[in-house]
Image (cartoon, rainbow, N blue to C red):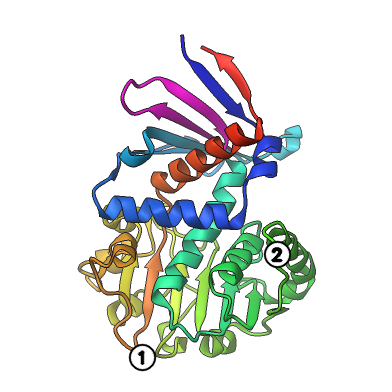
Amino acid sequence: MSKVTVLGSEDIKKLVTIPMALEAVEGAYAQKSRGEGGLWPMVFHEFDPGKADLDIKSGELGRTGYFGFKLVSWFGANPDKGMPALFGTAMLFDITTGAPCALLNAGGITAYRTGAAAAIGAKYLARTYAETLLICGCGELAPYLAAAALYALPQLKSVKLINPHHPEKTAAAVPAIAAEVDALLAACGLTRTAEISPAAELETAVGESDIIFTATPARTPYIKSAWVKPGTHLSCIGADMSGKEEVEPSLCAKARVFGDDAAQCFAVGECEIPHALGMLGALTAEIGEVITGAASGRTGAEDITLFDSTGIALQDIACSCALLTAAEKAGLGTAVEL
């Protein structure tokens, strides 16, 4: 028999914060760099191509005492049945015995850890005086990307948002995104001072931005290499499946390119197609190596830097560990004997 702590969506809403996610994700990257954490092969299965699928990402973080996985399933017809299209489930297991320890609703974890990843890329690779952020994509992740960036990079003065495929829809989406950003920051004791506003036109916005986050499911690049000015940093998070691509491949040929996991970046990330085309032979380094000082990040003000954040299991395991600890202190969660 083993006791498993179950944390549902309401428990997690009460516990998770932007700084918790930032600390957990940065720590996971660093542990991977030091050989204290490892990833296992990804599993992807299509039940019905283009209509229903799942992916499983798993790994271990030795210092935390856990290994685990996150399973995300997408069934496109679910909304017609009154159900969410996306479900995320995470589990933690004792690394010394294999005993199951925790079961978590991972929907909220995913949004927080993804925002944290993009912000950590900018924290370590953008110029320290960067003031302008452009977020390409106005979907569910946008508030988490903006809030994490504003927390991690307090020097930011302007956040622009754009729907790169339907720019005309951007302005209508911004007020709700800004309100959610304010709520996320208020939960960690901050009041936003940076302006959040819509960008009118993509090319101009790209050329005027110090930092760019890409967060769409695009399969055709919409950011052209020629638009990106020297010194820009890009955190690319949309490419999490083979064939997805947001940035013109030739940009990778002139940028210093970093990733969360080299093998995964070349298999399913923003690096996949540039690598296949022979424009990118290898990553400059993994982000964890930059965090620990094992590799250099930006080498000068004119460097273009790109962080390919494919999303690795260690992010979810680290966040799940932080949530489990917080739940124990707060007396939240339900204990179940298996």
* Front residue of 66 and 277: 66
Left or right: where 246 falls relative to 108: left
Q: Residue at x 23, y 65 (%)?
A: 294
Residue under the image location 26 percent in, 74 percent down? 296
Instruction: Please say whether residue 93 is one of the residues in the magenta stretch.
Output: yes
Element on which disc 2 rests: helix
The residue type indicated by label 1 comes to Glu
Q: Pointer 1 and pointer 2: residues touching (CB < 8 Å)?
A: no
Q: Which region of the structure is painted magenta?
A: 88-105
Q: In this picture, is 181 found above or below 2?
A: below
- Can you identify the residue that label 2 sits on? 181
Could you say where residue 268 lies in the image, as x and y percent from the top left? Answer: 36, 54
Could you say whether the residue bearing mark 1 is in a helix, strand or loop? loop
Tell me where residue 301 sits by quadrant: bottom left
Q: Tell me where residue 252 sits by quadrant.
A: bottom left
- Residue found 34% across the figure and 86% down from its top: 303
| Residue at the disc numbered 1 | 302
